[in-house]
């Protein structure tokens, strides 16, 4: 199949359609508005429903309804809108409803700006909403990877009955790259016997709820969720290693930062500096197995993020004090420059403080 | 490029390559010694906008009109009053870089009554590798929606078929054939075909004069390709 040129935001929409998603509820916000714009045109072509809700709070509750009825459903926003959705996301996790939530991060906190950022890492991976829950968080770094990960996002959410967040930043959403979208897979959705599709004669009633009023029952529910999360942590860690063979220093970066770090690694390698890159593809579960695989051979890690240092906490937890973990970041919508990261690498390799 | 008028209005589908086309057209006019203005009318695209390379372009002799100060970083439908100046000052040349799709073209409605038919040419840029504009039907649908919303008639088509860095001469020729078919259907001429300078000679050889080829340099690069 011939390649086409797509923006990241459009690719999320097309990837969702190809993964069998037929319901989208959302509210526009820069820098992800091309996604609802795309689906407003695309959903009617495949007999799906695109609906612009009156707010992000409404969107996420519409997602709750559609997911409860067993549909493949998605919503999207950027930081401020995702913050508004937190209550609904917690309810979705509590009721174990599969869905995909997209966050194309912009500069924050507060209203911030419309420039790209990665400052919602904590919000996505450490909770965000209330209660003991986890989202599976996927972080693509190219438009092609967006297309491929959208299928996985929906499959994982159905497999584990858990919301999945696809997280990128404005650059990833806005930039155009050639992609191979491949043949449309026949949407064979898994059986969802739990879905509230009506009480059939003689069968138990189906209830979608996150209310466990008796503490013993709520604790049992938490234990059940925890077991599920442990299983996900064991089975679903994903990462990419780039030129890590013989590396003394490994950069750790996701999304747009990782793209920039790849060029930094190339510059370093050209100069004979033993530097590689570990790019987490799942932010939760964080690829601690990837870090562990390198821990004996590397001398240090340098985490590069478009924030003031969030993922570095997971890198440090994974390194568990065995090797030093340094940080370089730009914040508020600024993008790290390859040359600056390179200088940081040199400084650390020369024994200077980071 | 002799068919261009004093004001070129560059429209097209979102991501069809309007900004790169507009920048290169404006630079070409400036190089010919004309007082040339490049006006950023993009009210929908938050990144990869003319305003980001304003300093570079002004260093190359171009006058860039775009929202000033903090507004340059906003996603507000703010248009500079200087745009009207370009329309009214018959001594200068203007290239208007309009936002994508009918939504972006809405900004033109503001100037509809000021634009004299002899003064301007509305150009519709097509990349057949983009979603929704891969065939004649899709392209014509977009063309008509932009004409409807702007209240202006397109006077020229530009083929900008590309797959970014993966563009081969065959990609360009295949795209040109589709745009050419659109031209036959709607009676609007194809003005030229845009290609990255790197593949210019190869495309020229393949086309054998079938279309005027306009080689361009690109200015909107992702952060990992910026120097």
Image (cartoon, rainbow, N blue to C red):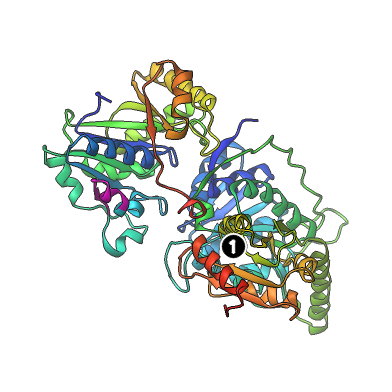
User: What crowding class fits label 1: few (fewer than 14 Cα within 10 Å), some (14-19), or many (20 or more)?
Assistant: many
- Residue lying farthest right? A202
Rendering coords of residue A315 (x, y %)? 69, 73
Q: Quadrant of residue B122?
A: top left
Residue A15 placed where, x, y %?
63, 45
Taking depth in this image into account, of B126 and B57 the one nearest to the observer is: B57
Give the residue pinned by disc 1.
A60
User: Does the magenta-highlighted stretch encompass residue A90?
Assistant: no
Taking depth in this image into account, of B80 and A354 the one nearest to the observer is A354
Say which quadrant the C terminus of chain A sits in.
bottom right
In the figure, A178 relative to A292: above or below? above
Q: Which residues are magenta?
A: B56-66
Q: Residue at x 30, y 54 (%)?
A: B55
What is the chain letter for disc 1? A
Q: Residue at x 39, y 31 (%)?
A: B215
Picture quadrant of residue A313 = bottom right
Looking at the rendered structure, the secondary structure element under dot 1 is: helix
């Amino acid at each position: 199949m011939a390649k086409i040129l797509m923006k990241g935001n459009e690719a999320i929409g097309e990837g969702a359609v190809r993964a069998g998603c037929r319901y989208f509820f959302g509210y526009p916000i820069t820098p992800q508005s091309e996604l609802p714009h795309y689906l407003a045109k695309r959903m009617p072509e495949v007999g799906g429903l695109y609906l612009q809700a009156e707010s992000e709070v409404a969107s996420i509750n519409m997602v709750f309804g559609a997911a409860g009825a067993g549909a493949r459903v998605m919503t999207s926003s950027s930081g401020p809108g995702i913050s508004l959705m937190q209550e609904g996301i917690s309810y979705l996790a509590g009721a174990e409803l599969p869905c995909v939530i997209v966050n194309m991060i912009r500069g924050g906190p507060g209203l911030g700006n419309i420039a790209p950022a990665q400052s919602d890492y904590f919000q996505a991976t450490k909770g965000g909403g209330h209660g003991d829950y986890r989202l599976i968080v996927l972080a693509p770094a190219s438009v092609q990877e967006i297309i491929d990960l959208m299928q996985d996002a929906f499959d994982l959410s159905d497999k584990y009955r858990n919301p999945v967040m696809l997280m990128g930043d404005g650059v990833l959403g806005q930039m155009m790259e050639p992609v191979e979208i491949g043949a449309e897979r026949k949407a064979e959705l898994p059986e969802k016997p739990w879905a509230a599709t009506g009480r059939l004669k003689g069968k138990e009633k189906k209830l979608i709820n996150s209310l466990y009023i008796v503490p013993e029952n709520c604790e049992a529910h938490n234990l059940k969720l925890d077991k599920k999360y442990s299983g996900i942590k064991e089975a679903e860690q994903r990462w990419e290693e780039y030129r890590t063979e013989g590396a003394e220093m490994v950069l750790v970066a996701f999304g747009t930062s990782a793209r920039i770090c790849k060029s930094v690694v190339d510059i370093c390698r050209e100069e004979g500096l033993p530097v590689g890159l570990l790019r987490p593809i799942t932010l939760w579960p964080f690829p601690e197995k990837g870090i562990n695989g390198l821990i004996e051979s590397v001398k240090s890690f340098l985490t590069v993020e478009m924030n003031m240092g969030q993922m570095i906490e997971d890198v440090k937890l994974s390194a568990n004090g065995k090797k030093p973990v340094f940080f370089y970041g730009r914040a508020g919508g600024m993008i790290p420059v390859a040359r600056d990261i390179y200088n940081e690498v040199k400084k650390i390799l020369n024994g200077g403080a980071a | 490029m002799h068919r261009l008028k004093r004001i070129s209005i560059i429209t097209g589908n979102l991501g069809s390559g309007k900004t790169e086309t507009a920048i290169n057209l404006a630079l070409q006019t400036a190089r010919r010694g004309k007082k040339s203005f490049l006006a950023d009318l993009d009210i929908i695209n938050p990144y990869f906008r003319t305003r980001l390379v304003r300093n570079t372009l002004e260093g190359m002799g171009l006058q860039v009109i775009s929202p000033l100060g903090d507004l340059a970083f906003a996603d507000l439908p703010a248009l500079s009053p200087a745009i009207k100046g370009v329309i009214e000052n018959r001594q200068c040349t203007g290239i208007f870089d309009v936002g994508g799709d009918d939504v972006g073209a809405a900004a033109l409605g503001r100037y509809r009554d000021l634009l004299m038919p002899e003064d301007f040419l509305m150009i519709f840029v097509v990349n057949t590798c983009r979603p929704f504009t891969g065939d004649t039907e899709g392209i014509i649908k977009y063309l008509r929606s932009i004409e409807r919303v702007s209240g202006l008639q397109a006077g020229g088509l530009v083929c900008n078929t590309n797959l970014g860095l993966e563009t081969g001469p065959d990609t360009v020729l295949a795209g040109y054939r589709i745009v050419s078919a659109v031209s036959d259907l709607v009676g609007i001429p194809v003005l030229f075909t845009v290609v990255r300078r790197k593949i210019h000679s190869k495309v020229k050889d393949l086309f054998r004069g079938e279309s005027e080829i306009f080689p361009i340099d690109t200015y909107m690069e992702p952060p990992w390709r910026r120097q």
